[in-house]
Amino acid sequence: MQESMLNIPDTNRERVVIIGCGFAGLEMAKRLKKSNFQVVLIDKNNYHQFQPLFYQVATAGLEPRDISFPIRKIFHEQKDIIIRISEVIGINAESKTVETTIGNLKYDHLVLAQGATTSYFGLNNVEKFSQPMKSVIEALEVLNSILHNLEDALVNTDPENVDELTKIVIVGGGPTGVELSGALAEMKRYVFPKDYPELDCSRIRIILVEASSRLLGGSSEKSSIKAEKFLKKLGVEIMKDTLVVDYDGSTIKLKDKDSIKSKTLIWAAGIKGNEIQGFPKEVSTKSKLLIVDQFHRVKGYNNIYAIGDVAAMISDKWPAGYPQVAQVAIQSARNLASNLINEKKGRNSKPFHYFDWGTMATVGRNKAVVDLKYIKFQGVIAWFAWMFIHLRSIFGVKNKILILINWIWSYITYDQSLRLTFLPKNFRFSRKD
Ligand SMILES: Cc1cc2nc3c(=O)[nH]c(=O)nc-3n(C[C@H](O)[C@H](O)[C@H](O)COP(=O)(O)OP(=O)(O)OC[C@H]3O[C@@H](n4cnc5c(N)ncnc54)[C@H](O)[C@@H]3O)c2cc1C
């Protein structure tokens, strides 16, 4: 393919190509505003996704559009950025070329910010039959399948089948698993009995499976204990020290424990870097994360950088690299952008140090856990803090208002209004024959 297919104007400025417009790529592009570079931002989607609220799309609390933002609109005020919607499939470091689905493009500096995807740790059947939640589309699919299983349960006369259809198993006791199971437990209590009056909703079971001995492994012990207590109060069944080894769409096999029968297995247990061809094996970790130095340079390359979820900046304090959270992505982007600008001015680059503001997770109405650097708190105040921080991070005044209205409405009415199943054209309803 020809570079001209991307229709990028020739320039005598150095070109920075950024792959991915998640938290990292977006911040990077913004920080290079009015710099002396020609900046090209490439993403396979034409929207930026706010991943921390995926679980609310999966539980009908928010619409996809509330947490997805058109990339071109974000950059209305930044005319000097060139945006191309295309998937990057390969890198040729020798010729300094990026290969995309619509053509090739030369770079002077390449910033890899393509994020991460779900890891199934080699469990092929789990990959085939479970449901991940790493994109807004996957979050919608989770919602679709839960609602469809309840519809099926309603017309099913075999009690065993009904049990399978009404049991929702979530694997992974990190923030995603905790937030999702809490929200589903609230739906079971307040929403499903109204939607499905003919169904015995006490039969709906929400089971959270975690391989380690505690939930929210990245939070303080106190927050883990509190989150578990909150979830149990909501009726979530918690299975710790439990390892899923296989799933055939109906039976979840566990290591050294009895199997669970369920039609819904939501996989929130692991992530791996989004791979792009062109790098030797030794450049990445087992989880396909690109190993970078303190200046975000990918091992062995001077002008290729990786930031955000796809990068592993390994140190004594962080032997697996920094955690895959939005703040790491944003702070890395700021550091790299200012280093590039400084280098051009002949100034020294600064090594990256992550400032950890802390962690938080919500478990349900009035229930959240917050661990800040100097203070930890749980309960109602934590819940308000969680809402404030998330609302603050959402793009655009309109989206902030829409989300706030949705949250207030749900709080007052104990209901969400978005239980629609938008099915793909090739969706097949399950048949009896
Ligand atoms: C369900 C969920 C809940 C989370 N909750 C929290 C939370 O509460 N707090 C928190 O701090 N973090 C949370 N995270 C993690 C946080 O969202 C990530 O750390 C953050 O999004 C990483 O940013 P990134 O820019 O590295 O990658 P991403 O945000 O994943 O962005 C990557 C971008 O690259 C694009 N892309 C990928 N491959 C290609 C390709 N080949 N070609 C072109 N474009 C490509 C994608 O379309 C995407 O736009 C959560 C994540 C998930 C999935």
Image: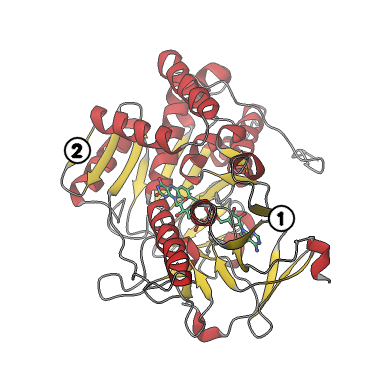
Name of the residue lying farthest toward the top: 413
| CB atoms of marks 2 and 1 within 8 Å | no
Q: Can residue 61 be seen in this view?
A: no
Q: Position of residue 342 (x, y in %)?
A: 42, 67
Q: Which amino acid does label 2 sit on?
A: Phe
Q: Image quadrant for the C terminus?
A: top right
For mark 1, does the 10 Å Cα neighbourhood hold few (<14), some (14 to 19), or many (20 or more) residues? many
What is the three-letter code of the residue carrying label 1? Answer: Arg
Q: Is residue 81 above or below residue 161?
A: below
Identify the residue shown where x is 34% and y is 42%.
361
Where is residue 381 drawn, in percent x and y?
A: 24, 29
Which quarter of the image is occupied by the N terminus? bottom right
Q: Which residue is drawn at 65% across and 29% down?
A: 151
Disc 2 crowd, CA 10 A, few/some/many (<14, 14-19, 20+): some
Q: In the figure, is residue 28 to the left or right of 220?
A: right
- Mark drawn on residue 258: none
Disc number lying in front (2 or 1): 1
The answer to which of 257 and 217 lies nearer the viewer is 217
Circle 1 residue: 84
Determine the CA span between mark 2 and mark 1: 44 Å
Q: How many labels does the image show?
A: 2
Closest to the observer: 60 or 251? 60
Locate residue 398, reporting x and y percent. Answer: 54, 25
Instruction: Of the two numbered discs 2 and 1 on the same chain, state the one appearing first in sequence.
Output: 1
Label 2 sits on residue:
377
Q: Is residue 169 visible?
A: yes
Residue at point 41% right, 19% down?
Answer: 411
Does ligand 1 reach within 8 Å of label 1's beta carbon? no
Secondary structure, mark 2, is strand
Reply above or below: 119 against 260: below
